[in-house]
Amino acid sequence: MGFSANHKKLNWRSYSYGYAASIIATTLGQPTFLMYMHLLDAEGVPAANASALSGTTVGLFCAGGCIGVLVSSWALDKFGRKPTMYALTALYILGGILVTAAQNIAMFIVARTIHGFAAVSFIATTSMYISELSQAETRGFFVGMTGVAIACGYTTASLMGLAFSYTTNPSVQWRTPLGICLVPAAGLLVALYLAPESPRFLLTKGRTEEAWKIVSKLHYDPTSENQEYVKEEFFQMKTQLEFDRTLDSSWIHLFRKPSYRRRTLMACLVTFLGQTTAVLVAAAYGPSLYAALGFNVKQSLILQCGWIAGSIPASLTGAIMCDRFGRKPFIMTGFVGCIVSLSLLAAMQAVYAPSGTNKVGLGWAVAALYMIVIFYCLGVESCGAPFYTEIFPTHIRAKGVCFCVFVNSLANLLYLEAAPTALQNIGWKFLLVFIVVLSLGSVLYWLWIPETRSVPLEELAAIFGDADEVKLYSSELTVDSNGEVAREEHHETEKSKQVPDVVMRESI
């Protein structure tokens, strides 16, 4: 099916986010960068405000993302999925250029804010876009693959940071890894040109024939003569979205209507707890954590590469299994695994980090850091996005998804801004915050949030108490020998040719 190719192209956006978010870890681990930005003097003594500025450098990337996703929510509904992604890609390239060319810490912080505006918005726009193009049975896999792409971005950033640390040119050591983000970003512009608009967005604008052409091409089944699945899927999609167009899609309605508010809180719980695993703290400040455990700069960068490499197979495993076993078991496994890993890391750091001489203890601390990213990617990274992108109805999905990513970025901003100062002053005790909050939140998650796998987007409202908003169930549909869609109601069949005339005029 054509969708697989488009999915691979658009996941370069997720890759670009992963690279931009992770490259700061190796950048802050490079003494040449710290000295150039006057965060470190020639004798290796940190400046008085070094920790605060490091936190600001990382935190404002997330702050830019908070603003970006809110602006994107408006643009996605106003202009469409593709035009919004074009604009974000152009802004990402601008941010990448400015980050690479930064002449001082102030310019670097501003550039990182612009970069974050676009990069964090990629998470919302890409995952939502893919969910709207996917079939119900494979939606978890395709949206989950955005997590794999992010993990690949993380891994590439770590490898580039390590590779260029061996050069003798101080500027090249940190500028080149930052500038590499421009390579996939430029390719994104080409990928977007080849990608289709979301058919669900087109239907909300009344552009039925365009939407049908996209669905019939993406979900074409060469083994089916009458294309029953495609016609039934489009019939349901069109019927539902004709109704959705009449509903209130305002921000106020998202929070005022109880069932919408419930969905929003559930999605925000997943995204907030995902960052409470401390995975981004470990990604951004990994070299600093390794230094606190007694490793030198080169050893820290090598360990960071090993740490992030485990994210790819873990994310891929979660994405593959997401549609078979469901979102809930994997997300819960990720939460529990991270709680255990954080507890082990806190214990090892408390006992063995001060002396830095016990190799076994330090080894277990490193193992705990590795376990955090593996459990996070297995559950939250690969199965979180499928959940929070699918639970909102189409007419308000952009606002719901973008608000969840806003909460995600807000949590990152909170933790990352506090991390360097907290790690410097209270060390391992900072990890207790993550352990306690994640433990309490995991219990709430398991008791409160339902399973959503393999349910068509147009039917998910019923799970959240909005059965009256579901206009048609896929189980009610059949396609007769003439290629017409038939709907069964109360054991009586009402046949109406709901698919556009183009279905009959063109060979599928």
Image: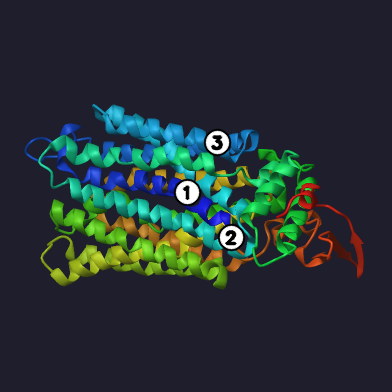
Mark 3 touches mark 2? (CB < 8 Å): no
User: Which of the two residues, 479 or 259, is positioned nearer the viewer here?
Assistant: 479
The type of colouring in the image is rainbow
Q: Is residue 34 visible?
A: no
User: Which of the two residues, 231 or 114, is positioned nearer the viewer here?
Assistant: 231
**First reached walking from the N terminus: tag 3 or tag 2:** 3
Query: Which amino acid type corresponds to the residue marked 2 in the rendered image?
Result: Arg
The residue carrying mark 2 is 139
Is label 2 in a helix, a strand or a loop? helix
- Spatial CA span between label 1 and label 2: 17 Å
Name which residue lies at 39% across and 34% down. 93
Q: Quadrant of residue 79?
A: top right
Give percent across and percent down for residue 132: 62, 51
Is label 1 in a helix, a strand or a loop? helix
The image quadrant where one finds the C terminus is: bottom right
The residue carrying mark 3 is 84
Name which residue lies at 35% across and 60% down. 432
